[in-house]
Amino acid sequence: MIKVWDYKKEYQLLRDDILEAVDNVFQSGILIFGPNVEEFEKKFSSYHDSKFGIGVGNCTDAITISLKALGVTSDSEVITTSNTAVPTVTGIVNAGASVRFVDINEYSLIDVNKIEKAINKKTKAIIPVHLYGQMCEMDKIMELASKYNLKVIEDCAQSHGATYKGKKAGSIGDVGCFSFYPTKIFGAYGDGGFITTNNEQIHDKIKRIRFLGMEKKKMSSGHWNGKYYAVEHGTNSRLDEVHAAILLKKLKYLDEWIERRRNLATIYNKELKNTSLELPIEHPDNRHAYYIYVVKHNERDKIMSELTKKDIHLNISYPWPIHIMDAYKHFECESCNCSRKNSKEDTCNLLTETEISSRKVFSLPMYPTLTDEEQNIVIKEIKNILM
Ligand SMILES: Cc1ncc(COP(=O)(O)O)c(C=O)c1O
């Protein structure tokens, strides 16, 4: 069987290191907010060319906390793409804001040429989602943010280690939000998330919000109380010591693993270029980290079921765009007059590329421990079906 994702081979390679890390934490007696979180915050933010980093419970929380820290409120609108994982939108709605969707380009990323039309008086922020491992065109996004005084929250859940014009994901906008969900390029053995920023004030505010809005306070006796005084409304979202210790062990392999992903992508590109599959395009300004290798085909379902019969398992990211989902179809798209709200139609005449893509996309097995032999089987079986 060839799985679309598998952590067990990686775990066998790192088992001794990981068990040592876990044991050290358990022996230390410090499970929350300890030296591992502190060290990981320094190292992971520095790896992403950012001055500050804050560990949180997951990336959905990272997005909500960041929006709140950046002043997004219930009368704000946030621009993002409908071709994303649901949590991008969950994060926005949890911050109380509304969502305005913009269509995608040939890279399956937010079409930067369509963002300006979607900006209005309520717009407070843009969330470019660096989907599939590739970064959005950040120059144009930062130019618009500066022109209209908007905040930029990079959704880096799928783009650890990716670069745009040599700059790492999470280092260009006001903040970058990362996920350590196990399947990710850089995953934990459970949930985890992270926020990067180069701004000290934003860092301080995010740090406060992630832990119940609390600060140290002097008591009437004159003594400083640890931290049990909420100066603002926050939430409870922490990366724990066990996961920080595990991620510290894994960090030294990240570059090597991304290189392996890129090699696998190069082989898929070469071997599948003469088939009827539409292959992913890497923007010339980007270093794609290939979280997933996404192809498109009109006969997706047939190809997938044929491959499943051969015990090759694939995935669809994502079968439905967010704007057609019951939970979010009330949000309007860019300056849209198609009134989806009042009709039975799910489709939006301004998000056509997103809709077309969702009917064709699927991803081939892609992870550093996928062997050359396994990849050859996948390629051979796809060619058998298509040729
Ligand atoms: C693009 C994107 N944003 C946000 C998230 C949320 O990450 P988490 O599961 O850590 O909350 C994910 C994870 O699925 C994602 O893929």
Image: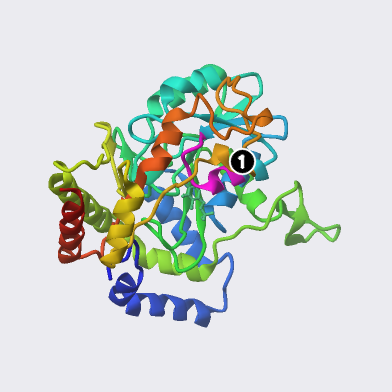
Total number of numbered discs in the rendering: 1
Viewer-side residue, 64 vs 37: 64
Element carrying mark 1: helix
140 in magenta: no
Q: Given the image, on which type of amino acid does mark 1 rest? A: Ile
Query: Which region of the structure is painted magenta?
Result: 81-90
Viewer-side residue, 331 vs 181: 331
Q: Quick check: 18 left or right of 173?
A: left
Q: Tell me the residue that label 1 is attached to.
A: 92
Residue visible at 44% across and 64% down in the picture: 188
Viewer-side residue, 234 vs 215: 234
Label 1 neighbour load within 10 Å: few <14, some 14-19, many 20+: many
Q: Quick check: 110 left or right of 231?
A: left
Q: Position of residue 146 (x, y in %)?
A: 51, 21
Q: Position of residue 234 (x, y in %)?
A: 71, 50
Residue visible at 47% across and 42% down in the picture: 84
Quarter location, residue 7? bottom left
Q: Is residue 253 visible?
A: no
Q: Position of residue 380 (x, y in %)?
A: 15, 57
Q: Quick check: 196 left or right of 333?
A: left
Residue visible at 34% across and 78% down in the picture: 15
- Outermost residue on the right side: it is 220
Quarter location, residue 335? top right
Q: Quadrant of the N terminus?
A: bottom left
Residue visible at 52% across and 63% down in the picture: 191
